[in-house]
Image: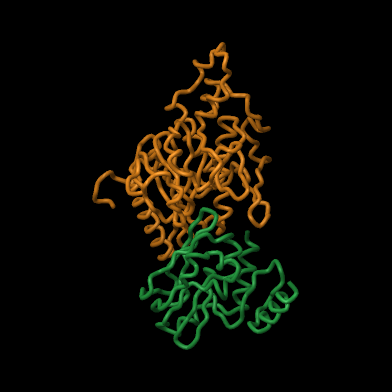
Chain colours: A orange, B green
Amino acid sequence: MIRASISSFGLISTYSIPQQSKKPNPYQSHQKVFSKSNHVLDFTSSKTLEIRKTCECFDLYNELVPYDKAWSWQKNIVREKKALIESNEECPDSLIILQHSPVYTMGTASSEEHLNFDIKDPPFQVFRTERGGEVTYHGPGQLVMYPIINLRNHKMDLHWYLRALEEVVIRVLSSTFSIKASRLEGLTGVWIGDQKLAAMGIRVSQWITYHGLALNVTTDLTPFRWIVPCGIQNRQVGSIKELLRQSQPSNGCRKSNLHHPDDFQLIDITHNSLIKEFSEVFQLEVQHKTNPLFEPSENNI
Amino acid sequence: MASRLLWASRAASYLRISAFNRGFASVIKDLKYADSHEWVKVDGNSATVGITDHAQDHLGDVVYVELPEVGVAVTQGSGFGAVESVKATSDINSPVSGKVVEVNEVLSESPGLVNSSPYEKGWIIKVELQDAGELNNLMDADKYSKFCEEEDSKH
């Protein structure tokens, strides 16, 4: 389905197109990543006959969910999983995908110095959370993924987990937009040059992860100017839309406008790709839950 | 530098540190260990708790330590605080049950002590033990060393 979408707007050839612009041969290709300890990690593509564990997915990718509701929801799911583990029951993984209404969030070690405004009078609500990482902005046009997974089902290694999350985004950018993104040593996240496209910050409690990553698709990047994103000076924040726009030829002679996807399509395409790559990297079968636990009522908090 | 090495080897023999080779996480005899990689040093009814060299090595640079309040109760196996490194904040679990009588405030300013001195200056809390029998649920140094080796080989 993603291939069909790509052909309708044309590939941008400004970025170096990676070798595998076609679907990788599941029996051959693999991507190696180096962890902190320099062991080669193998994110092997699936073998088609392998039975994967399921991961329930609560997909609100087109909804603007208030931060506090999503946060409570995550914590509820974590509590449930801990209880399952305690009673020695199967503890399947979960994934939440959504967008947030505009909000700033800070991590455990976050410094208020990275806010370019008075915290008592912020432009948007500010939440201090229990995740790692510094301050960031969430808002419309940004796809947020909260994998709530039991690392005992995968690898009990936080570095591996962070690299795996980055891998998901790198693959999305590569396979769907032919954008060659990279990691920067010591700077968690996914980068194109000195622009960060995806930010990450997680919390792990008894090997159950929550919080996760945020990928700028069509996000209005202005609110990032009012913070020092992730505490990193001298770098920028980017979005997929901006990158695609910058790569458009300036003469306008091409029929590029006809093929340029609108915001809605971009979000759609990215969302589909995120789920696919998440499922590949973590070797999970993502099953959509049609009735999410989250009900937008006061009682659920 | 030479005097430092001399100090280190003297300290090593004093503390009876085993496997002090570079590349292997140090494990100290006479401490007890939880499988979630915390250590406890018992002195009568008082216990000092921290995370092990193996844990700090796997975490990477600790940028933040969340300390509990003095006076709160801790339970063996339950979280009492957190450490942050590389954009990941994870629980620290207590290897013993009891009451927190002291926390290492220095870690608020210098969280890196957890990396540089996990068994000494990087101690995290002191607990008044509730049940010394719980220590039997923990591993001794040799068992913990083996446990770490097995865990690492799975990766």
Does B70 sit above or below residue B155?
below
Q: Residue furthest top?
A: A253
Along the viewing direction, whichever of A51 and A116 lies nearer the viewer: A116
Q: Position of residue B60 (x, y in %)?
A: 59, 60
Along the viewing direction, whichever of A229 and A264 lies nearer the viewer: A229
Q: Residue at x 61, y 40 (%)?
A: A182
Q: Residue furthest bottom?
A: B44
Quarter occupied by residue A179? top right
Q: Would residue B30 be visible to someone looking at this image?
A: yes
Q: Position of residue A146 (x, y in %)?
A: 44, 47
Does A273 sit above or below residue A300?
above
Q: Residue at x 63, y 78 (%)?
A: B142
Q: Position of residue A203 (x, y in %)?
A: 46, 55
Q: Tally the marks.
A: 0
Left/right placement of residue A32 relative to residue B62 reads right
Q: Would residue A287 be visible to someone looking at this image?
A: no
Q: Residue at x 51, y 46 (%)?
A: A284
Q: Residue at x 49, y 75 (%)?
A: B49
Left/right placement of residue A49 relative to residue B42 reads right
Does B110 sit above or below residue A16?
below
Q: Position of residue B80 (x, y in %)?
A: 42, 68
